[in-house]
Amino acid sequence: MIDPSSVPSLRWGIYGTGWISEEFATSMMRFTNQQIVSIASRTPGRAEEFASKIGMPGFDDSYESLAAREDIDAVYIATRPSGHLEHALIAINAGKHVLIEKPISMTPDDARAIFSAAKAKGVFAMEAMWNRYLPQASIVRQIKEQGLLGEPRLILLDFCQDHAGIAARWVPGGSSAMYDMGVYPVAFSIEHLGYPSKIRALGRLAESGVEAEVTAIFDYEDGARMIFTLSALNHAPHHATISGTEGIIEYMTPFVVPSGISLSKTGFNTEQVSWQDKSPQQGHQGLAYEGTAFASYVSAGLSESPIHPHEESVKALEIIAEILKQIGAKTI
């Protein structure tokens, strides 16, 4: 893991005043040496209210005015995914580095446009796939590098939360279940198995025509497979298991927050070695890890995250689009 004191202290602005912005800001203030300087919202009064609530030094009345500030180095974009392209370009064109909440955009073309603009302006752009930067993710990478997993052959995932009362989840072209929740298992499969050669999906649609539940199978050229179940109607533990030729990694639930893992040899009922994350950065306070990583990459002059390259963000959106096409979900 990267020591927060070993990276430069960037001056951050935030777009959007939702709950994820609060988790990001407070986690950065508690667990890093990053500076949270200002927040902006297009809803009158919201930015000032947010800044006062968590003790931020200032706020801005528009995304443009925040991006124009000379005391801002980077912008965390936590607005609705449908606005990510517009909002990212405001910050990028003003010369700011950008950390953009997942999904980075609603379409592969929009994602490519964001990354192309960042490259042209010489700034750093990263999708906020925060679970890639958690301690358990680092341990899993070490297990794989040491050959203890062997070749990954099967991934099983569940991501189920009752979002019946969240209006945005049921609006076509907004932030439906596959974009908000399904991006996690898709990105997870890409990380550990690469890009599938075949996708098979079935689902259940809501009255609005958007996806309510999805089960998908990804097949790979080498015979590996990933199976995941997504539901926006029911709560269930967020399981994740990677079965390899030499070992089995099982994540403690939920796998997308600081939790823990176990490793066992292949076979039935073999002995497990477990590690549990007992740090104070629990729940979404684990967002601080990606902030520290972001600052480290900026300092190193990188153009993209070494553990979540731009191509993977684009490919995840292509896979999501294919799943939605197969189940006949309404997207616009």
Image (cartoon, grey):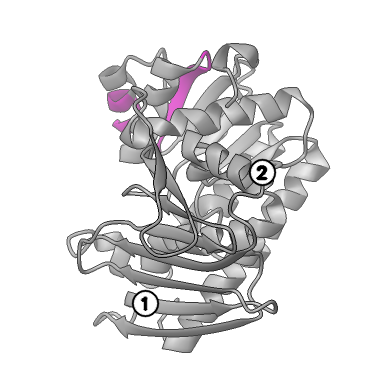
Q: Is residue 103 left or right of residue 208?
A: right
In the rendered structure, find residue 123 and report the number of the disc placed on it.
none
**Residue 227 sits in which quadrant?**
bottom left
Callout 1 crowding tier (Cα within 10 Å): few <14, some 14–19, many ≥20? many
At label 1, the amino acid type is Val
In the image, which residues are magenta?
33-50
- Classify mark 1: helix, strand or loop: strand
Amino acid at dot 2 = Gln
> Which quadrant of the view contains residue 187?
bottom right
**Count of picture labels:** 2
Residue 2 shown in magenta: no
Q: Earlier in the sequence, mark 1 or mark 2?
A: 2
Q: Mark 2 points at which residue?
A: 146
Q: Which of marks 1 and 2 is in front?
A: 2
Residue 269 vertical position relative to residue 229 in the rendered view, above or below: above
Q: Position of residue 112 (x, y in %)?
A: 71, 58
Q: Position of residue 130 (x, y in %)?
A: 49, 42
| Nearest to the observer: residue 271 or residue 150 | 271
* Mark 2 secondary-structure assignment: loop
Of residues 87 and 271, the one nearer the viewer is 271
Can residue 171 be seen in this snapshot? no
Determine if the magenta segment contains residue 36.
Answer: yes
Where's residue 217, x and y in %? 49, 79
Which residue sits at x=71%, y=42%? 306
The quarter of the picture where the C terminus appears is bottom left
Q: Name the residue under label 1.
A: 214
Q: Which residue is drawn at 32% across and 36% down?
A: 283
Residue 54 against residue 90 in the figure, above or below: above
For the N terminus, the image quarter is: top right
